[in-house]
Amino acid sequence: MSSLLDVVLSSAFLAAVLRVATPYLLAALGGLVAERSGISNIALEGQMLGAACTGALVAGYSHSVALGAVCGVAVAALMGVLLAALRLELGADAIIAGIGLNLLASGGTAFAVYTLLDDKGGTSGLKSGTLPTVTLPGVESVPVMGDVVSGQNMITWLAFLAAPFVAWLFFRTRFGFHLRAVGEMPDAAASVGIPVRRVQYAGLALSGALAGLAGVFLSMGYVSFFVRDMTAGRGFIALAAVFLGGLRPWGVFLAALGFGAAEALAVQLGTLDVPPQLVSTIPYALTLVALALYAWRRKRRGATAEVAASL
Amino acid sequence: MTGTLIETEDRREYRATRRRDLAVDLSMALATILAALAIGFLVMLATGNNPIKAYEVMLTGPLDRSFRVGRWLEDATTLTLLGLSVAIPFRARQISLGAESQLYAGALAAGTVAIFLPLPPVAAVIVPMVAAAGAGAGMGLVPGSMKARLGANEIVATLMLNAIVVRVYDYLVNGPLKEPGSSAVHSKSIQDDSALTPLTDWFGTPMGRANIGFGVMLLTAVALWLLLTRTPLGYRIRMTGSNPGFAEYGGIKVPRVIEWSFVIGGAVAGLAGAHLVQGVYGRLEPGLAGSLAFEGIVVALLARNNPLVVVVAGLFYSYLRAGGDIMEQQTDVGTEIVVVIQAVIVLLVTAQALPELLKRRLTRRQVGVR
């Protein structure tokens, strides 16, 4: 047990947590923005995949990492707009349309890579590079924090800035007020002159862009290439974090960070004598319990409200 | 059949409506498929492949040899069962994404019983299947009652349960259930008596791993169709799905119906797990189901949740999959294009509002003419 503590408290482990949590943070905040706008974005997974693949391919061919990242994020944002269009223009169920987009991304990226590179596995044959890491001159020499914070990829920094950004957006800006109003009660929002559709399109585009950043991090931060289906269910976990976090920016932030920590821990435990598969079920079981508790509490509150209303 | 003239007429009209609905469902599925294939054609053309040759191989390949037919039927069995399993909750307007957890729970139950429990010949086949259906139903009950009793979001609940069960399965196959002394990761083989009879034994030609699970699947589809159209519970499920508020008002206990829809769906997905263990692999393997659970959703949607049409959609969809594999072997075009075609199918299916929109516009024009 003491060895476990040693591992968990080491600065290398904490640095790993930040790294592993990055895609969860970004994708979960993206899911939050969509959820709050009233359209569930279950296509987070596909958007990450699309962005990861586009990023690596464009960077590889153009020899510009920045251009790759921008294109990746743009593709994911477009997928968000497409989801909104399917929902708003064609009346599709957002969940089912999202499943379709996930399939499209999985098949489309594999098809694109195979067509362009004649390689079934991924883009490892293409030199696409990684986004730069950030080192802060002063922080590096601070004992523990220096090792944890310094040298992290720039997208990790962005991920941690994204949470305050989304909180600011939600509660301090006009767009945020509109977004939440639309998600809460579209008819009421429309009646006071809020352009409901435009707000939802913008919300889904932003949601896709955040998921896209997460995807770009996978193929241009973690590693420097795209591998088929490399998101490996992270989009769904991010979706869980959205609900576990109670649909609030800081709650979602903590939930996503927790999922990242759990995954990093599961990797570490592989070296000890604990079955990693069982450890990695903990966040999901927690979410399931939290979901039940949350619903139970809401139901009880609803019941009291009903009683109050009937009096 | 006795009754007043009005009753007979009423009945006749009801039947006609139902026949028409079935025809509409089938033709919609067909139109969707053709549109998706057309888009696939264009994609192949645009990427410099030869779509005519690819489609020729893809569409004739699976019938080429008897073992390829077997490969197709084997895939169709699992896929159709999974499609049926989500069609039932979908009918009650519950978006259950839990087929994966139900399938793995079913596979675990069927596998452990079939490996470790000595049983007399016929029971050795049936008991594991019953165990699988029970385990699947139990996995359906969890999100089902969370939704019905607490109002917890069923999408998140089923996704979480999937993640948990798949990992527990993975752990068991890598650990306690792993065949001792084997270097590869899988369980011991099931007892010979527990295996589902291969179709090869029946038809005398090599049919690969296709087995009488196919017949079980057909029976299940008919049973579910009868359940939905001929029983009070089926009526309640359909009512709950088409208008929950009205169903509640009409005295239907909506939460209980929702729970049942999850339990029934779970049992069917459990059977899919049993089919994979007892019919296809003969043991517990890691990653048993691949991405099939999600593709079952596509099949159910394509069939508009009509159990009989699910069979047709399942057969077609697995034909595409089988054809895609053969296409990959014989031409330069990879199976990825099949996934793209599948995705297009889903997106077209979701845009069901499209024909609705057309219909509404047509009616409006008619009204305007009058």
Image (cartoon, coloured by chain):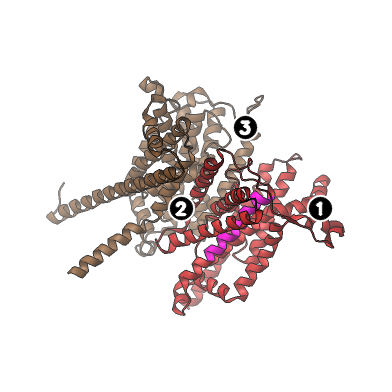
Chain colours: A red, B brown
* Secondary structure category for the residue under label 2: helix
Residue at screen point 39% across, 36% down: B319
Provide the residue span drawn in magenta.
Answer: A203-221
Residue B368 visible to an observer of this rendering: yes
Q: Is residue A212 left or right of residue A201?
A: right
* Type of amino acid under label 3: Leu
Q: Find the residue positioned furthest to the front.
A: A62
Q: Is the residue at mark 2 from the same chain as the one at mark 1?
A: no
Q: Which residue is mark 1?
A: A11
Q: Residue furthest bottom?
A: A192
Chain name for mark 1: A
Q: Could you tell me which chain the residue with mark 3 belongs to?
A: B
- Helix, strand or loop at mark 3: loop
Label drawn at residue A158: none
The answer to if A230 sits in the magenta stretch is no
User: Which residue is the site of mark 2?
Assistant: B259
Both on one chain, marks 3 and 1? no
User: Label 1 sits on what residue type?
Assistant: Ser
